[in-house]
Amino acid sequence: MASFQYNFYDKKVKDLIYQFDTHYPKQDPVLRLTKTDENSKALPWSTGRILYSKNVPFGPAVDFKTTVKFTVKPNDNAFPIADGLAFFIVPEDHPFPEGKNPPPGGNLGLFEQAGKSSNVFAVAFDTYLGIPYYVNLGIDIEHRKPEANVNVPYSFVGKELTLVVSYNGATRAISASVTYGSETFPVSLSYNLATILPSGVRVGLASTTAQNVAVHDVHYWDFTSTAP
């Protein structure tokens, strides 16, 4: 079906589409999704996306698993920070918000300003929504408001985290977790993704900043999909 693995310490990654403010900073061996200055300080009103450039077959029987190693860090001790990082799946010809100029901010460059967009599946590590001193891992189905979510300690901010998302087409089980060291925070949902996604999709990662900011760095990303 589809399989890839990228280590972003190597800046010669192929088969990716880089959109908006995504870049490889000279001073840091990472892929950075949002704008920073010459001192690697986050800047406001930024959007960044990457997409795997090849069509990924999808359907009722498809299973997939993805792993993302990433860091969301504040400028010094700034609080609150925004907005987080999302893994997403959309139709191959999906019209992202505002065409080539998506609004930065809490919708992560994936959802319209009202927070809704058809045919979007995402798992978001959200550093802005949620209760104070926690961040949030949520499963988003066509809406920025998660269908299922778990609060994650704010101490995860600034650390290199591991996000794992998997889907079983037969059982319709969506599972996601974020891990730092020995601490893991899982969330799950039963949903038939074939009802909102067509037979050909794109997978990607996205981040935004608004008035509140953070540095959004990706260290590693893999994805595998299979079908019986």
Image (cartoon, rainbow, N blue to C red):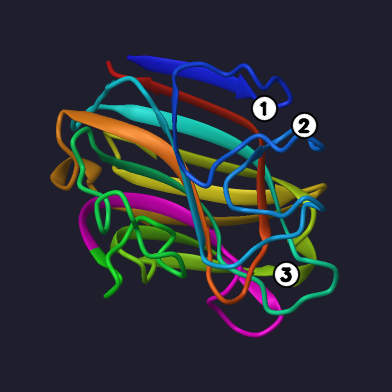
In front: label 2 or label 3:
2
For disc 3, the marked residue is 153
Q: Secondary structure at mark 1?
A: loop
Residue 51 image position (x, y, % from top left)? 41, 33
For disc 1, the marked residue is 8
Residue at left offset 66%, top offset 85%: 132
Left or right placement of residue 168 versus residue 34 in this view: left
For disc 2, the marked residue is 29
- Callout 1 amino acid: Phe
189 in magenta: no
Toward the viewer: 163 or 169?
163
Residue at left offset 84%, top offset 74%: 77
Q: Secondary structure at mark 3?
A: strand
Q: Which numbered dot is residue 140?
A: none
Name the image quarter holding the C terminus: top left
Residue 50 image position (x, y, % from top left)? 46, 37
Left or right placement of residue 177 versus residue 18 in this view: right
Query: Which of marks 2 and 1 precedes in the sequence?
Result: 1
- Callout 2 amino acid: Pro
The outermost residue toward the right is 76
In front: label 1 or label 3:
1
